[in-house]
Image (cartoon, grey):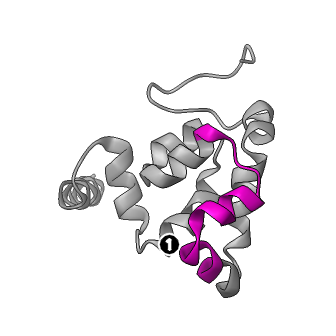
């Protein structure tokens, strides 16, 4: 880690090393810009992941549908959102996973934070 880089507990900084480690996973997720590729993934996820040469940790993370696992496997949040969309997950689902809350709890937290900002 660089001297001027700070860490936030529970996060994986996405730096050059993570970008190299997660290249195949992120490349696969980028491919989901195409409806044809999304359909191919859903038809045979194992074969699709093999075609992108994902490593064992990345395959396990994708299968888990846990965003934190995918981030730890080198995934970039922007590209992972494309994968999450295939399964009908939105950013509130992802935020709930990242905070260990249910989606309803996370949504309530966002509303409360917005209400506090309006009062300031």
Q: Position of residue 58 (x, y in %)?
A: 61, 44
Q: Position of residue 93 (x, y in %)?
A: 35, 61
Residue 96 left/right relative to 77: left
Q: Using a 10 Å C-alpha cutoff, classify the residue at mark 1 as few (fewer than 14 neighbours), some (14 to 19) or many (20 or more).
A: few
Number of disc labels:
1
Residue pictured at 47% horizontal, 42% vertical: 68
Q: Please, is residue 108 above or below residue 69 in the view?
A: below
Q: Please, is residue 32 above or below residue 71 in the view?
A: below
Q: Position of residue 16 (x, y in %)?
A: 80, 35
Name the main secondary structure of what is drawn in magenta.
helix
Q: Is residue 95 magenta?
A: no
The residue to which callout 1 is attached is: 85
Q: Is residue 51 magenta?
A: yes
Residue pictured at 67% horizontal, 58% vertical: 49
Residue 100 left/right relative to 66: left
Frontmost residue, 1 versus 53: 53
Q: Which residues are magenta?
A: 38-57
Frontmost residue, 78 versus 84: 84
Q: Position of residue 62 (x, y in %)?
A: 53, 53
Quarter containing the N terminus: top right
As drawn, the residue found furthest toward the bottom would be 35
Frontmost residue, 30 versus 120: 30
Q: Quadrant of residue 119?
A: bottom left
Q: Callout 1: helix, strand or loop?
A: helix
């Amino acid at each position: 880690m660089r001297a001027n880089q700070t860490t936030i507990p529970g996060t994986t900084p996405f730096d050059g090393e993570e970008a190299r480690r997660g290249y195949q996973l992120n490349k696969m997720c980028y491919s989901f810009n195409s409806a044809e590729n999304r359909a191919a993934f859903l038809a045979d996820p194992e074969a699709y992941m093999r075609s992108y040469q994902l490593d064992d940790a990345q395959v396990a993370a994708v299968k888990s549908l846990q965003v934190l696992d995918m981030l730890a496997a080198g995934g970039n949040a922007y590209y992972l959102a494309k994968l999450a969309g295939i399964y009908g997950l939105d950013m509130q689902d992802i935020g709930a996973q990242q905070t260990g809350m249910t989606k309803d709890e996370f949504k309530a937290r966002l509303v409360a934070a917005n209400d506090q900002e309006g009062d300031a």
